Image (cartoon, grey):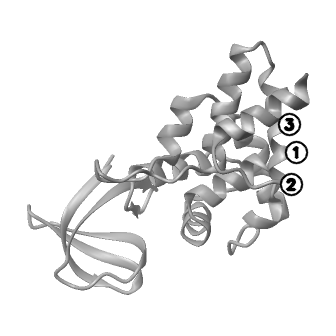
Amino acid sequence: MIAYLQGKILHSDGERLILLTATGIGYEIFYKGLVAPQTDKEFYIYSVYREDSQELFGFDEIEDRQLFVQLIQVRGVGPKSAYTLLVNLGRNRIIDAILFDQKNVLKEAPGIGPKAAAQIILDLKDKMAKGAPAKKQITRSKTSSSEVPASTNVDFISDAIMAGAALGLKEGDVMELARQLMKNKEYQNSEELVRDILKRSN
């Protein structure tokens, strides 16, 4: 399976592009967004093989590819629907929508109806809420050593789950409290959220 490609853009129309690699082979890749010809660019790739064709989906970040793989494992969500979802909403918005049962947010993406939105939340909610390593793998963006990535709701929830576990709280209880609190208040850091959860759980 092709997982990564690097080369020069020969053509881009906003839906697909042709990438010429150093070996002289040109690959057609599904990629939303225009890229200027002759631009040097790299992509993380997910390959979809069918009997009579092969489709390549391109991503700028490995974390987007990882979320794409999770989305296409949901019943009723195909590669093109999953890709459209990522392009229209972005990785962090999708994760937040899953964690907070926001079906209407997922339905903003073309091709995602009520049933698909509900199935995505049902299948992926528990996976998104699992501990810090998985969360970091999904939400961390590419940054230089001098940059600090912005925290997201999923970061706060994962930190709260770990803090709650250390104090003997159940993961499900922490998740429910976090969702209730974050619907009514915008938190600036996870410590503030953890403090409010502990107050509510006492």
Q: Where 195 falls versus 138 (above or below)?
A: above
Mark seen at residue 32: none
Between circles 2 and 3, the one closer to the viewer is 2
- Neighbours of disc 3 within 10 Å: few (<14), some (14-19), many (20+): few
Kind of residue at badge 1: Gln
Q: CA distance from mark 3 to mark 1?
A: 6 Å
* Side of 38 relative to 155 (left or right): left
Which x, y percent locates residue 40?
18, 71
| Residue closer to the observer: 148 or 153 | 148
For residue 28, what is the image quadrant? bottom left
The structure residue drawn at horizontal position 53% and vertical position 53%, both measured from the top left corner, is 68
State the residue at coordinates (56%, 38%): 135
Q: Which residue is mark 3?
A: 176
Residue 40 left/right relative to 87: left
Discs 3, 1 touching: Cβ within 8 Å: yes
Q: Which mark is residue 184?
A: 2
- Residue drawn at x 39%, y 50% is 62
Q: Secondary structure at mark 3?
A: helix
Helix or strand or loop: what does disc 1 sit on? helix
Residue named by callout 1: 180
At label 3, the amino acid type is Glu
